[in-house]
Amino acid sequence: MGILYVVGTPIGNLGDMTYRAVETLKNVDFICAEDTRVTMKLLNHFEIKKPMICYQEHNAAQAGETVIARLMSGEDAAIVTDAGMPCISDPGEKLVKLCAENDVRVEVVPGPSAVVSALAISGLSTSRFRFEGFLSVNKRQRFDHLAQVRDARETLIFYEAPHKLHKTLRDMLEYFGDRRISLCRELTKLHEEVIRTTLSEALEMYPDNRAKGEFVLVIEGAAEEDITKAETIEEAFLQVKALVEKGVRGTDACREIAKATGFSKGELYAMLVEQNS
């Protein structure tokens, strides 16, 4: 039985590659890569010559079965992503799950992580945090996601692409209020930048979708006084209606407000149905 090595790779600066990561990639039988062209540049830099298998979201099921079969036949493999730790907000998690289901040994070779790196230099609380990945481009799912984490006390961490940054900052300001935010751009690369400001000021800094570079957004958690409260079910229902008006599905809005206020989800939904009947 072979071993799958989960290998962290640099998020920008090739000098962050660890000795162990290099040795692991040299010694495995093959490498699973999100984008073989990107990984080939990394391998060429460290003079590593190994066969690669493309393993990404659209072919994870088929490629996963191939990888598992080779691992179970005794070959060792490494999985890498384009940058950072594989299997974090990444299809590699499916391969690790498949290994667990088939009793295939998995070992981690730690490396750079954009999430932890951004948090460490954000200037915000690091004792408790929640990584939320990317927001959906679907308006309803996006608003539902923001509603779910609005009352979280932990520091929130999101990934965002430059062409969606303006819309994301706008929606976060609407849902979270004017909280502190750290915008970490192009971490470890030549043009690395960390901007510590507020959501409203960040929105003014990026008034359109012409930002450059990949962003990690670190946002302070909800303060005690910001957490949704309601003295009566009527007040809770007003909060439900506010979410629905923003595009959140009725059932999702009732669930979130019920969780935040302690009132019955069923009663809130019944009120919503009655109003719309």
Image (spheres, rainbow, N blue to C red):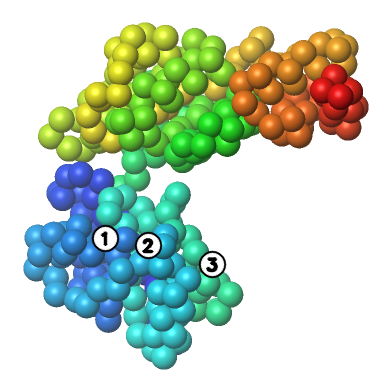
The answer to whether residue 111 is seen in the rendering is no
Q: Residue at x 49, y 21 (%)?
A: 171
The amino acid beneath tag 3 is Lys
Q: Secondary structure at mark 3?
A: helix
Q: Quadrant of residue 221?
A: top right
Which residue is the site of mark 1?
Answer: 35
Q: Residues within 10 Å of mark 2 (few under 14, many from 20)?
A: some
Q: Secondary structure at mark 2?
A: loop
Nearest to N terminus: mark 1 or mark 3: 1
Q: Secondary structure at mark 1?
A: loop
- Residue 165's place in the image compared with 189, above or below, is above
Separation of residues labelled 1 and 3 (CA atoms): 21 Å
Q: Quadrant of the N terminus?
A: bottom left
Evaluate if marks 3 and 2 touch, with contact meaning CB atoms under 8 Å apart.
Answer: no
The answer to whether residue 277 is seen in the rendering is yes
Separation of residues labelled 3 and 2 (CA atoms): 15 Å
Q: Residue furthest bottom?
A: 73
Which residue is the site of mark 3?
Answer: 97
Which residue is the site of mark 2?
Answer: 56
Nearest to N terminus: mark 3 or mark 2: 2
Say which of marks 3 and 2 sits in front: 2
**Number of marks in picture:** 3
Indicate left or right for 185 with 133 as reference: left
Q: Residue at x 19, y 76 (%)?
A: 50
The amino acid beneath tag 1 is Asp
Q: Residues within 10 Å of mark 3 (few under 14, many from 20)?
A: few
Q: Where does the image place residue 112, in percent across and percent down from the top left?
A: 30, 47
Q: Residue at x 22, y 77 (%)?
A: 51
- Residue 95's place in the image compared with 10, above or below, is below
The amino acid beneath tag 2 is Gln
